[in-house]
Image: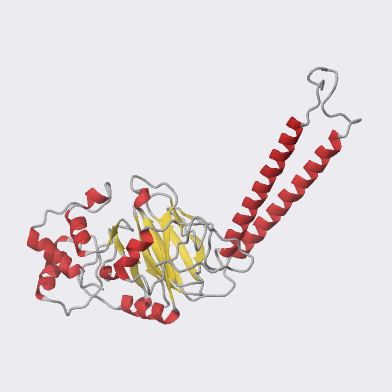
């Protein structure tokens, strides 16, 4: 269910594109992923202090542009229909605009109005850039997003090593609290974009860029890589899940915990198979698996999607992805594993325990 959009004072809203917000408590788990994937990424509606000024500027410039087009079209049509016979086209010596006539002052007025409007737009733009450069209040929450072909590694930073953990393709944030985002990359140029919360910020190899996000309402906000980065660029999505402070802290505490050892027999067999077949590329904290090629899977079962928003996170989809990831996302670094049926089912059973 998508909640009704709440208007911010002085902010023009989109009535025809729909929202990008899905209520967390009314669209839980995998259902949220399916619902969120069906929503458009709407940059004409914002949720949060980082997005509000940009959305207002977007609507303002759009309104100014529409007014200018209407005025120019009206003047052009008026000139065409009011054209007097025997004008300058029939008399080359007669100029359409002369100092003696009344046309030149209108040109001066038009240039003056255009200059004022353009200057005002520049001032508005610079004011907006200044307003969104840094959050109004300091925040202790900083995350680092590492863009890969074609997924997002999300690392929550802390003052000590036991406060740091890594997840993938999902960013959880508390409602009403600014979150600083450090953007790093190691392969090609990507662009971090969650249109309802923030503008685009490039992710450039060898360079650390910074931005920040804030959500004014609980919800699931869709994001996307906005810079062409290769074959599967279109399948490099992410989700920002905003929740109340207490729910966010509960999620954070759960993410800090290592993988549970209290698992069923088939999952225990799957853990052994995982260590033999998957641990070179993936990390599961609390186990010998420490690979850094693919996403951290310590709590993969708690995520809404797999493969950066490509598939809903269900046992069937997880099985199909492990069996042949290239079918769903050709060119990705996940190899095709020749696993026997029971081995594959046991690995999936183990991954389903990593909540």
The residue at 46%/64% (across/down) is: 182
> What residue lies at 55% left-to-right and 75% top-to-bottom?
138
Q: Quadrant of the N terminus?
A: bottom left
| Quadrant of residue 323 within the rendered picture | bottom left
The percent coordinates of residue 333 (x first, y second) are 26, 52
Q: Within the image, what quadrant is residue 50 found in? A: bottom right
Looking at the image, residue 265 sits to the left or right of residue 73; the answer is left
What percent of the width, then of the height, locates residue 354? 23, 72
Quadrant of residue 345 in the image? bottom left
Looking at this view, is 206 or 234 the one in front? 234
Q: Residue 278 appears at what percent x and percent y?
A: 19, 61
Query: Left or right of 134: which side holds 291?
Result: left
Q: Please say if 1 is above or below 61.
A: below
In the rendered structure, the answer to whether residue 66 lies left or right of residue 82 reads left
**Number of disc labels:** 0
Judge left or right: residue 88 versus residue 212: right
Q: Quadrant of the C terminus?
A: bottom left
Residue 184 seen anywhere in this rendered image of the structure: yes
Front in this rendered view, residue 76 or 330: 76
Residue at the outermost right position: 100
Asked which colour scheme the image uses, the reply is secondary structure
Q: Position of residue 242 (x, y in %)?
A: 43, 71
Q: Is residue 320 above or below residue 260?
A: above
Given residues 142 and 303, the one toward you in this image is: 303
Residue 169 can be seen, yes or no: no
């Amino acid at each position: 269910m998508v909640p009704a959009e709440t208007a911010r004072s002085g902010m023009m809203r989109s009535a025809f594109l729909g929202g990008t917000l899905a209520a967390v408590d009314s669209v839980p788990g995998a259902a949220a992923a399916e619902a969120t994937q069906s929503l458009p990424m709407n940059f004409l509606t914002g949720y949060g202090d980082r997005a509000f000024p940009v959305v207002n500027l977007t609507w303002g410039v759009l309104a100014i542009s529409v007014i200018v087009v209407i005025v120019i079209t009206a003047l052009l049509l008026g000139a065409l229909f009011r054209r007097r016979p025997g004008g300058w086209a029939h008399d080359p010596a007669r100029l359409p605009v002369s100092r003696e006539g009344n046309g030149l002052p209108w040109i001066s007025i038009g240039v003056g109005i255009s200059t004022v409007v353009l200057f005002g737009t520049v001032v508005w733009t610079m004011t907006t850039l200044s307003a969104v450069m840094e959050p109004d209040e300091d925040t202790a929450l900083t995350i680092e997003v590492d863009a890969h072909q074609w997924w997002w590694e999300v690392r929550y930073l802390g003052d000590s090593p036991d406060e740091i953990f890594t997840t993938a393709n999902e960013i959880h944030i508390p409602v009403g609290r600014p979150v600083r985002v450090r953007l790093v990359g190691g392969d090609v140029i990507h662009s971090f974009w969650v249109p309802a919360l923030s503008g685009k910020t490039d992710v450039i190899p060898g360079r650390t860029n910074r931005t920040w996000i804030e959500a004014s309402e609980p919800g699931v906000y869709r994001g996307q890589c906005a810079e062409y980065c290769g074959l599967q660029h279109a399948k490099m999505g992410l989700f920002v899940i905003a929740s109340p402070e207490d729910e966010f802290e509960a999620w954070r505490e759960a993410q800090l915990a290592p993988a549970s050892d209290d698992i069923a027999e088939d999952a225990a067999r799957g853990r052994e198979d995982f260590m033999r077949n998957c641990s070179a590329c993936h990390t599961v904290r609390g186990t010998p698996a420490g690979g850094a090629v693919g996403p951290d899977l310590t709590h993969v079962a708690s995520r809404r999607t797999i493969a950066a928003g490509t598939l809903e996170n269900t046992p069937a989809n997880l099985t199909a992805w492990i069996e042949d990831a290239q079918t769903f996302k050709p060119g990705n670094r996940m190899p095709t594993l020749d696993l026997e049926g029971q081995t594959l089912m046991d690995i999936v059973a183990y991954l389903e325990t990593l909540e």
